[in-house]
Every structure is written in C-alpha cells, then in structure tokens.
Amino acid sequence: MRRPTRPVRRKDASGTARRSGARLAARAPVTEPLVTLHWTVNGRSVRTRVPPMKRLLDVLREDLGLTGAKEGCGEGECGACSVLLDGVVVNACLVPACQCDGRRVVTVEGLGRRGGISALQRTFVEHGAAQCGICTPGMLIAAHALLARERGKVPTDAAVREALAGNLCRCTGYQKIVDAVRATARAAKRGRATR
Ligand code: FES
Ligand code: FES
C-alpha cells in the first residue's frame, strides 16, 4: 500500500505545531467544573456546557451527536478525527473544548448542502475512495480544505498527497482517494468554465 509522501504535523487549536503523540486534551474527570462554549458548529450557533479539558472529539460525538469524526489513534497520528477549526484542519482528539469558545467548527456532517452530500463526497463514492470508511470523514475534511484553498485549479497528484499526508488509510491504497479529489477539482473547474 502506497502511503502519502511525508508525515504532516498538524497544529493544535492555539496554532502551535504539536509533538508526535502529544495529548493536549484528555477525557475529563466527572468532577471538573463546566464552562460554556458559545461557538458555531456546521454553520449553527451553539451553546454547550462542558468540562474545559474535554476533547473536542468527545464534545462533538457525545454532547452534539456528531459522530462523523472518528477516533482512530487518539494521539494525533491518524487524522480520523479531523475537523475544520476556523477553516484549518485540526485533529479533534488533541483540541481541548475550552479552545473552541467563539470559534467555527466544521465536521464531515457540515460538508453537504441542503441535506444532501457534497460533490466531493459523491465523487469519493464513485471512485471507490471509501471502503471501511474509518478514515473517510478525515480524508473528506482535509480534501475539502485543499479544494477550498486551490479554488479554480486542479491540484497535482503530489499536492493532494501532501494535503492528505496527515490522514492514514489502511484500505484503499490512497490512489482512489487522490483520483477522487482531483476529479472533483476538474469537474468544478469545468463547471466554472461553462458558466
Ligand atoms: Fe485523532 Fe487519530 S484519532 S489523530
Ligand atoms: Fe478503510 Fe480508509 S477506507 S481506512
């Protein structure tokens, strides 16, 4: 199985490059005092009472019922928990809830429009880029961020691999994922050209 070009060290919510395996957020003890987050999740303003050091991944899954982001390693290595925090891809298993106050979070559930799936998600299905599906939400988030940055262009194979280097997949061999991302960009570019 061909792995992406090189490992990526993503940043935590404060913008600091994380150390490999660092645990910045942890499952919070029951007795920890609660804080109130006023934040935006998938475009909706939300108020959430949580322990300050509860992991963003657990807040999304347990408190908001958004189970799209998955837990793979729980240590910032696999990317299965990737979400967008103010437009930047982060590993939600490393982000404490208290760092999300006043910020915008987008999960895989927020990528579709009007209850349907996005063009990127549809192209993943068409290309067989999702198999067991554990990595897929994180792959979609990272690919979505790349396509938003490269709007109007078709990223090279190498650029897609670079953008997805923080997301591990044990099923697809990666090429189908890369092909799906580039096909989505090509279709968007054609759409713009014929408008
Ligand atoms: Fe967060 Fe693996 S579960 S990076
Ligand atoms: Fe199974 Fe990627 S589709 S880990």
Image: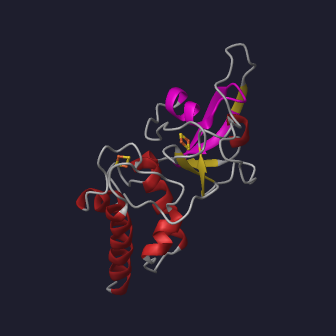
Residue ID at (47%, 74%)? 158
Observer-nearest of 130 and 13: 130
User: Is residue 117 positioned above or below 44 on the image?
Assistant: below
* Quarter residue 34 falls in: top right
- Could you tell whether 91 is left or right of 51 in the image? left
The span picked out in magenta is 37-63
Q: State whether residue 117 is above or below residue 151.
A: above
Quadrant location of the C terminus? Answer: bottom left
Q: Is residue 143 magenta?
A: no
Residue 74 on image: x %, y %: 57, 36
Report the number of numbered marks: 0
The quadrant where ligand 1 appears is top right
Q: Residue at x 61, y 57 (%)?
A: 88
Q: Residue most toward the front?
A: 1
Image x and y of residue 192, in percent: 38, 81
- On-image quarter of the N terminus: bottom left
Residue sitting at the far top: 31
Image height check: is 165 above or below 185? above
Quick check: can you spot residue 147? no
In the rendered view, tell whether residue 149 sits above or below residue 93: below
Residue 72 in view? yes
In the image, is 109 to the left or to the right of 37?
Answer: left
* Residue that appears at 50% across and 32% down: 61
Picture coordinates of residue 76 (x, y %)?
60, 44
Q: How is the image coloured?
A: secondary structure
Which residue sits at x=29%, y=58%?
A: 122
**Camera-side residue: 29 or 46?**
29
Image x and y of residue 23, in percent: 68, 36
